[in-house]
Image: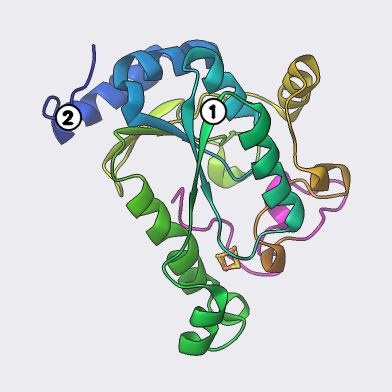
Amino acid sequence: MTVTQDGTGVEGLRELAERAGRELEDADALDILRWAADTFGSRFCVTSSMEDAVVAHLASRVLPGVDVVFLDTGYHFPETIGTRDAVEAVMDVNVITLTPRQTVAEQDAEYGPKLHDRDPDLCCALRKVKPLEEGLEGYRAWATGLRRDESPTRAGTPVVGWDEKRRKVKIAPIARWSQQDVEAYVAEHGVLTNPLLMDGYASVGCAPCTRRVLEGEDARSGRWSGRSKTECGLHG
Ligand code: SF4
């Protein structure tokens, strides 16, 4: 079934997502992505934080030239931008870089410096949530690299679900994968990864809000460390 621009409405999309979530729960990541490519075609994209290119790589196998959306918050580590550039150069994907309406300097002028320290929710809203909302407007479905084992807040992630906030189908093809599954896929296919993963970081976000993790900590404990905040609002 192909969803056309003037075809399935929001209610139909929601039902489609919920049904696919049940039917594809035990499916391979590639089969989940094949379903997404067949169903949504060019109105499907992958979002990537450039921590690694696993989902982009998987998606490019079923939809060569697939759109890979990257949010350049202006606060990324140079290694993250380098990973984005490498993905763009060597993979069969179409990297689309989204940027916030304001540069960091413009945001500092309006809200004061280091908004990330004083009000990280507002900073994320301005630099991540809003640009992604606008960037996803033309799509009906988006895929992410969310995994259930990353943190308690992600334990219930469906492989296909309904993103009520954006009214789109949200796909997590590797939701059931473990860290070992990711590492095995990276090794088998020579997938690009962010060099910071070899330097003590388990989850890579904006530089001011990311630290290395300690042994025994979950992968996302290095994000907004010392705060109750665990998600940026993209997945909540
Ligand atoms: S992760 Fe930190 S620096 Fe990045 S947008 Fe959120 S609060 Fe701002």
Q: CA distance from mark 1 to mark 2?
A: 23 Å
Residue 25 visible: no
Q: Residue at x 71, y 63 (%)?
A: 207
Q: Which residues are magenta?
A: 211-236
Marks 1 and 2: CB-CB under 8 Å?
no
Along the viewing direction, whichever of 73 and 214 lies nearer the viewer: 73
Q: Whole-percent x and y of residue 47?
A: 50, 39
Residue 134 visible: yes
Which mark, residue 93? Answer: 1
Q: Whole-percent x and y of residue 84?
A: 65, 43
- Is residue 94 rendered magenta in the image? no
| Location of residue 183 by image quarter | top right
Q: Residue at x 72, y 47 (%)?
A: 82
Q: Residue at x 52, y 24 (%)?
A: 173
Q: Residue at x 66, y 59 (%)?
A: 76
Q: Whole-percent x and y of residue 134?
A: 33, 53
Task: From the image, tell me which residue sits under label 2.
Answer: 5
Ligand 1 - quadrant of the structure image: bottom right
Q: What's under tag 1, amino acid-wise?
A: Val
Image quadrant in which the N terminus is located: top left
Marker count (numbered): 2
Dominant SS of magenta comes to: loop
| Location of residue 205 by image quarter | bottom right
In the image, taking residue 58 as reference, residue 233 lies left or right, namely left
Along the viewing direction, whichever of 63 and 145 lies nearer the viewer: 63
